[in-house]
Image (spheres, helix red, strand yellow):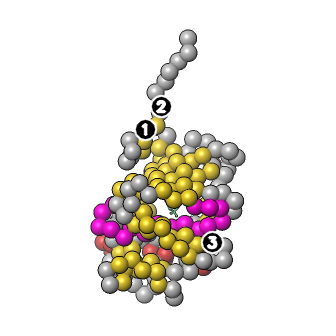
Amino acid sequence: MKEIIMPAQIFSGKTLAGEQIGHTIRTVGQIRDIFAEGVTLSESQARETAYVVSSYLPVDEGTAGGLFFGITELYPGKVGSEYYMTKGHFHSRKDTAEFYWGIEGEGVLILMDAERRIWGERMFPGSLHYIPGNVAHRVANTGNTILSFGACWPSDAGHDYGSIEQAGFAARLKEVDGHPTFVTP
Ligand code: PAN
Ligand code: ZN
């Protein structure tokens, strides 16, 4: 008799649930160094949640040929004139790409190639983004509600946060006259 089983993980279209779903929370205080220097955070803002990543990693990190799936909920807010954003990273294995797609809210996907060329793509419910290999990616919430987006990436991609911690992105996305604007230092 061939069995038909229930999947152990459910993606409702908005949230991800199941035994194997992990959650990572980043507070504003934990990611304070990604924002422009010179802005002091209050203690209460430092305790705010900046984003939560719910992820389904069905195989061990580093496995060739596998896929990972994640949903990021990025809260609205600003540090100075800079929007709450993800830390951002290159993949450790340079030739690995990723899909992002917008689920709720609005924002900008900030992309930077190996030559430090920057561009942005608007994110909104239904937006689909192909992030090629060797392109750093970070998301900023430019709206007043939670920005939720999905991600699917190879299980051997790995995350290189160090390059961004050291050199940052070549431009910052700030609110200027009420609009998201790239500002170069
Ligand atoms: C995403 C990101 C997630 C959080 O799943 O990891 O949105 O952003 P940071 O990892 O930059 O803090 C992804 O790009 N995975 O590869
Ligand atoms: Zn990634």
Front one among 14 and 119? 119
Q: Quadrant of the N terminus?
A: top right
Secondary structure state at the residue bearing disc 3: strand
Q: In the image, residue 71 lies at what x, y percent?
A: 45, 52
Amino acid at the residue labelled 2: Pro
Q: Is residue 103 above or below residue 58?
A: below
The quarter of the displayed image where residue 173 is located: bottom left
Q: Is 180 on the left or on the right of 168, as rendered?
A: left
The residue lying at 43 percent from left, 38 percent from top is 10
Q: How many marks?
A: 3
Q: Using the numbered discs, state the Cα–Cα distance from disc 3 to disc 1 in whole angstroms.
A: 34 Å
Of circles 3 and 1, the one toward us is: 3
Which residue is denoted by mark 2 in the rendering?
7
Ranked by sequence position, the earlier of labels 3 and 1 is 1
Residue interval drawn in magenta: 131-146
Front one among 158 and 118? 118
Q: Is residue 60 above or below residue 165?
A: above
Q: Using the numbered discs, state the Cα–Cα distance from disc 2 to disc 3 in whole angstroms.
A: 37 Å
Ranked by sequence position, the earlier of labels 2 and 3 is 2
Which residue is denoted by mark 3 in the rendering?
113
